[in-house]
Image: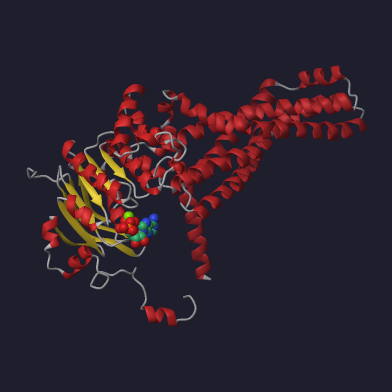
Amino acid sequence: MMDKLQQLGAATLGVIERLGRGHIFIYYAIKGFPALALRPNLVLAQVFSTGVLSLIIILVSGLFVGMVLGLQGYNTLVDFGAEESLGVMVALSLVRELGPVVTALLFAGRAGSALTAEIGLMKSTEQLSGMEMMAVDPLQRVVAPRFLAGAIAMPLLAAMFSAVGVMGGYFVGVGLLGVDEGAFWSQMQASVEIDEDIINGIIKSFAFGIVVTWIAVFEGYDCVPTSEGVSRATTRTVVHSSLAVLGLDFVLTALMFGE
Amino acid sequence: MAENDEPLVKIRNLHFSRGDRKIFDGVDIDIQKGRITAIMGPSGTGKTTLLKLIGGQLRPDQGTIHVDGKHVHKLSHSQLYELRKRMGMLFQSGALLTDINVYDNVAFPIREHTKLSESIIRHLVLMKLHAVGLRGARDLMPSELSGGMARRVALARAIALDPMMIMFDEPFTGQDPISMGVLVTLIRSLNDALDLTSILVSHDVQETASIADYIYVISEGKVVEHGSSETLQRSSSPWVKQFMEGLPDGPVPFHYPSLDYADDLLTGSRP
Ligand SMILES: Nc1ncnc2c1ncn2[C@@H]1O[C@H](COP(=O)(O)OP(=O)(O)OP(=O)(O)O)[C@@H](O)[C@H]1O
Ligand SMILES: [Mg+2]
């Protein structure tokens, strides 16, 4: 009994300590941001590898999600004779929810896992140690540009996901199922609000970008420097950041659209 | 060589443990300026650990380490990094950055810490690579190098910024007799020409004894002997004799601390 309690206590302390380390870690990385202003190439290279290289999977997924929304939405709306609102439904679902959330989940799997594995391997092959001894702070040279790039790339990817998704809904709704084209677009334009919907969606995706990239770089930096350690850290990145995104999405949605 | 009063690295009463295992148990070491000081000892005694403690990557449990008059573990983050700019370290594993080629690896510290133009950097990098005999390998990626070549590139990188002090962790491992000879001469001439201070960790007793001005032998957390290489070779201590001559039998343990061999075998299943 006491043993169990002790284990529970130790595990809780471990979690809290890790949380603390995660915050100190990101504080030092963010302190490296001003230096990056002088070397934008470091960030651009990372925007390329986290953002541009994730583009294909984001675009393809966005298209399919939009097409499914078109089909499902039509089937529901047509019962109420409201199939002309299909554009609104597709656009709102994407911009408010699916765009940021699905993009963040895909981003965690595609870019987050790659970041963790890369940094974890740099740690286990002593490259991070080597940098430290060359008086180059890996938090500022390796972590900071990756973290910033993730936070920049995620809202852009989510925006593209939503845009392609709307096109997918349009192809299915207007092209396949014969919804009136004028109604599809004009209702969408009339009902989707910039500040209410678009801005909130951007805030969400930005928050998800920060959380996913933060978890990814921290897991890599904090991993046990062995091949098993790196593989576990990579798994943890995907699991934890997916859960964090879904949980945070609920909180943000409640705050934004709650009343 | 003039005797300097204040050593460049001054270690006093160093204690350090990993888990329950005591790695250092009250170690005092002085590294004099402008000299090559060798740290020798059986594998696993903590030589690499010692270099990491000097570089401020690990924190001692007790005791102090001063480098160039500065208390390494009391420095602020930025002061520590300033100090490290003047220390070079050759890692046992090389620790090259694997996603850039040999040239960029050697250029890395220069680009990070200076604003020199690319044409000057090119001169510097080629000079350093020439010194280790790998000017022709500049376009290879680290994965295309042999272990010995990787260590020589790491050496070129460690001297790229002309530091005041270099720590060599096993520079001779994996070198053939020719490059070994070149490296020995290189380390000696670098030290003398640039007025460097070198700390050399190595198992190669003959090579080390031939270039080191002063040798510390450590084992089981203590300094067991120190002195110039002649003094050590004439040492009457059976321990030092065994180590310097590489004899298997004697007071130096070859095995990591363990149960009695026969007991261990007879226990049957794994504990
Ligand atoms: N990260 C670590 N965690 C726990 N123990 C470690 C770690 N690194 C090294 N040790 C232990 O510390 C001791 C000293 O290791 P160190 O690498 O300093 O030895 P060394 O003298 O450099 O050996 P070698 O000559 O083989 O390179 C070893 O017994 C090792 O088991
Ligand atoms: Mg070692």
Query: What residue is drawn where x is 73% and y is 30%?
Result: A94
Which residue appears farthest toward the front when viewing the image?
A: B178
Tell me how the rendering is colored: secondary structure
Question: Where's residue B90, x and y in %?
Answer: 31, 45
Q: In the figure, is residue B16 to the left or right of A196?
A: left
Q: Residue at x 39, y 48 (%)?
A: B147
x then y, percent, for residue A218 = 49, 43
Q: Splitting the image into 4 quarters, where does residue B133 fall?
A: top left
**Residue A63 percent across, percent down from the top left:** 75, 31
State ligand 1's quadrant: bottom left
Residue A109 shows up from this direction: yes
> Residue B93 versus residue A22: which sits nearer the camera?
B93
The spot of residue B171 in percent (x, y) is 30, 49
Label tally: 0
Q: Residue at x 18, y 67 (%)?
A: B241
Q: Quadrant of residue B264?
A: bottom left
Quadrant including the C terminus of chain A: top right
Is there any visible trace of residue A206 in the rendered image?
no
User: Between residues A167 and B149, which one lies in front from this camera angle?
Assistant: B149
The residue located at (54%, 38%) in the rendering is A213
Q: Quadrant of residue B193?
A: top left
